[in-house]
Image (cartoon, rainbow, N blue to C red):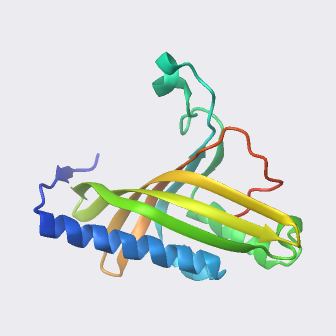
Amino acid sequence: MSAVETFVMDSNQLRELTWQAERFLYREADLLDNRKYEEWLATLNSDLVYFMPLQRNARHTELAERETTKEGVDIGWFEEGKWTLAKRIEQIRTGVHWAEEPVSRVVHLVSNVYVTSVNEVDGALEIAVSSRVLVRQNRNQYENMVLGARRMDVLRQSPEGWTLLRREITLTENVLTVKMLTTFL
């Protein structure tokens, strides 16, 4: 069992951590947009959980229980770790990945970044970060996709810098109208 200590921070410390989180997320978007996947993988923690639940239509009184599928219980669009993401990148890099040949042009717009909590877990600083992302993907001449999502991340500080420990991506739609879901959100 891990030891968790919650910090109370002053506004300057919180501002500094928010700035660091923004820099991490903006650099991540740049790496993905420029297909620097191996560099992106280096920013992922070895214990990464990368989860994107399905959205369901639910009655107002049942939103908390039914609106999104649950990690480890229900099916999701993604429930992966660093190893699986690395395998997806290897597949894209083969040049015979039908959904990414020719490769897509992708733009990630990240906004509304704020730190929701700061904890020390087993001696490592971890920050929970809320953000929004809009991803535009274009493939071939006329295939365009736009996805909007809320993200909840946990970043862990190490001597080498911040790493992504956990990401939960909640899409704004419950029915995907795109042909493929190959981009990293």
In the picture, measured across the screen, residue 75 lies left or right of residue 120, that is right
Q: Quadrant of the N terminus?
A: top left
Q: Residue 145 at x, y = what percent?
A: 75, 60
Q: Quadrant of the C terminus?
A: bottom right
Front-lying residue, 73 or 109: 109
Q: Residue 168 at x, y = what percent?
A: 50, 50
Looking at the image, is 31 positioned above or below residue 182? below
Q: Residue 134 at x, y = what percent?
A: 58, 61
Q: Residue 15 at x, y = what percent?
A: 21, 68
In the picture, measured across the screen, residue 30 lies left or right of residue 143, that is left
In this rendering, the count of numbered labels is 0
Q: Does residue 185 appear in this view? A: no
Residue occupying image coordinates x 20% and y 64%:
14
Res 109 quadrant in image: bottom right
Res 55 quadrant in image: top right
In the picture, measured across the screen, residue 139 lies left or right of residue 30, that is right
Looking at the image, is 112 positioned above or below residue 53? below
Residue occupying image coordinates x 23% and y 56%:
119
Looking at the image, is 91 positioned above or below residue 146? below
Q: Does residue 33 appear in this view? A: yes
Most distant residue in the front direction:
142
Front-lying residue, 20 or 144: 144
Res 58 quadrant in image: top right
